[in-house]
Image (cartoon, rainbow, N blue to C red):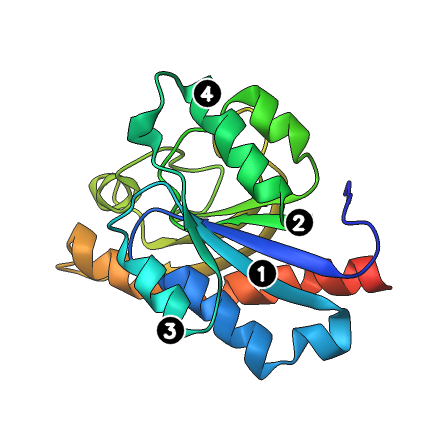
Amino acid sequence: MRNNMGSSPKNIVILISGGGSNMAAIAKAAQKQAWQEKLGARVVAVISNKPEAQGLVVAAGLGLATQVVDHKRFESREAFDAALQDVIDGYQPALVVLAGFMRILTPGFVRHYAGRLINIHPSLLPAFTGLNTHQRAIDAGCQVAGATVHQVTAELDHGGILAQAVVPVLPGDTANTLAARVLTQEHLIYPRAIRALLEQAAG
């Protein structure tokens, strides 16, 4: 696996668009497991494309720096991504972590962070790329569903798989009940996958 993290300190920038529950799980794991002391890594900023994102309040409560790059203020995806990239690069990130960041990124942005950009997707990739994953899994009659941590490439939801978690699809499940079951596993595997990448870079 390509890994462009470089030397310490390993700064982690997390991008969010909503409530930030995966971001909080990562930040709390970093604090609880002493990533800075043991791995030279820390979450240095949380950035949202939505000023009203509740995750910004959560991040501030965890003592993290927050910034907003409002996508509505830009005329094109390219212009937004360029502005976002400038803000991210100010933190000299070893990893850029997408945690419920609801924007499709341009190929140039993805190339700029090649080997440093990761995402979590609420399905067992390569199944059910894109949106509405839980309802699609139910409609397809799947007995299991789950989540995947993967590297980000220009092709949506197709990068190298770093970690997966499997949950059962239960009789009577709705998209919401299945999403909640999957989310509990996301909160476990995302910090674990990031720590594994950091340990690999340290080793």
- Residue 25 visible in rendering: yes
Quarter assignment of residue 23: bottom left
Which sits in the foreground, 86 or 148? 86
Where is the C terminus found, in terms of image quarters? bottom right
Contact, mark 2 vs mark 1 (Cβ under 8 Å): yes
Q: Relative to residue 188, is residue 201 drawn left or right?
A: right
Q: At 30% from the left edge and 43% from the top edge, which residue is drawn?
A: 50
User: Cα distance, mark 4 to mark 1?
Assistant: 24 Å
Q: Position of residue 48 (x, y in %)?
A: 39, 46
Amino acid under disc 2: Pro
| Disc marking residue 93 | 2
Count of number-bearing discs: 4
**Residue ID for mark 4:** 79
User: Cα distance, mark 3 to mark 4?
Assistant: 31 Å
| Sequence-first disc among 3 and 2 | 3
**In this rendering, is residue 45 above or below 107?**
below
| Sequence-first disc among 2 and 1 | 1
Amino acid under disc 4: Ala
User: Cα distance, mark 4 to mark 2?
Assistant: 21 Å
**In this rendering, is residue 98 above or below 194?**
above
Q: Relative to residue 57, is residue 98 drawn left or right?
A: right
| Sequence-first disc among 3 and 1 | 1
Amino acid under disc 3: Gly
